[in-house]
Amino acid sequence: MPEGDTVARQCRILHEALAGGTLTHCDLRVPQAATANLTGWRVQEVRPRGKHLLIRLHSPSPGTPPLTLHSHLMMDGIWHVDGKALRSSDTSAGPRPADTIRIVLTARHEDGRESRAVAYDVKQVRLVRTADEDSLVGHLGPDLLDPAWGAEHRAQAVENLGAEPERPVGLAVLDQRNLAGIGNIYRSELCFLRRIHPAAPTGEAGDLGELVDLAHRLLVLNQDRTVRVTTGGMLGRDGDLWVYGRGGQQCRRCRTRIERGELADPRLEGTEARVLWFCPRCQAGPGAPARQHGQDRRGERRRWSGR
């Protein structure tokens, strides 16, 4: 699933392409919004909220309330602008079949310029009054890429994470109700950088304020990049990440083999466990599960439950 920085970058490019323009064509290929006619509506702005995309629209008719076109990239969603994919390291930018198109928008600007935005494989496409946006995103915790991020956002995120000290930290940081924007890549990288095993209880994860600060800093630093970097960019070719996707390879810090595991959330019935990566040596601090005698270290999956 694309991380918050990917969503923010796609929103920024969409905003540059559409904002200020008037829709000359709108095709919403989902049952609940298929009959909506937004021709003539003006695109006010495109903004992210965590991993959600919000396209805010103004009607040409006085007195008609503004609307928000909401969508979520989920695992495979991606937007194309004027035929070019909004590339990122966690979204496949290859060609997509036409039957995966869910939104088509064409906006004409006052200078005559036209921009066309097409969304492939996006989910949760909904059209609501802008005043009712909270019905879609009001459950989210503080957004790590909120331009107004400050002490209050940080304090709320820390409070949210600390509310369940027995919950595995790898589940707590992925829960968008605690803080919004962290996906599976940052989950693995954050835990490594903080020397925390993802299955360790949040109450044993050390200073949660420092964890939130690091998450905020990493997302801000990467929001303009198409290739995400958490190592500082000083490790040469293929040295962008510490552990994510590197099962069986040597840890860049201690040379122990990186392991691949799964962490299941028993609260989410019917969902599959999410894969994660970790260094069994660097992340063997408080709360880390004990290693099994004779365990193979060649990158096999280990599974934990959040119970």
Image: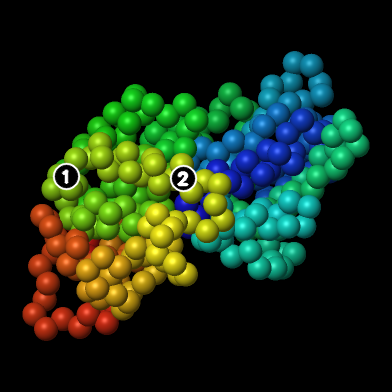
In the picture provided, is 207 more to the left or to the right than 1? left
Does residue 11 sit above or below 150 in this rendering? Answer: below
Type of amino acid under label 2: Leu
- Residue furthest to the top in view is 63
Tell me the colour scheme of the image: rainbow
Give the percent coordinates (x, y) of residue 71.
59, 45
Q: Is residue 67 left or right of residue 62?
A: left
Give the CA distance from mark 1 to mark 2. Answer: 23 Å
Residue for badge 1 = 206
From where the camera sits, is residue 66 visible? yes
Q: Which quadrant of the structure image shows residue 128?
A: top right
Quadrant position of residue 219:
top left
What SS does tag 2 mark?
helix
- Residue 81, placed above or below residue 279: above
Relative placement, left or right, of 212 versus 182 is: left
Vertical position of residue 131 compared to residue 205: above or below: above
Residue drawn at point x = 79 percent, y = 16 percent: 62
Query: Who comes first in sequence, dot 1 or dot 2?
Result: 1
Mark number displayed over residue 235? none
User: At 34% across and 57% down in the image, what residue appears?
Assistant: 189
Q: Are marks 1 and 2 in contact (CB under 8 Å)?
A: no
Image point (26%, 65%), residue name:
253
Residue occupying the far right of the picture: 112
Q: The residue under label 1 is which amino acid type?
A: Gly
Residue 204, position in %: x, y? 13, 48
Q: Element under label 1?
A: loop
Measured as percent of width and height from the top left, residue 5 is found at: 50, 47
Q: Which mark is residue 221?
A: 2
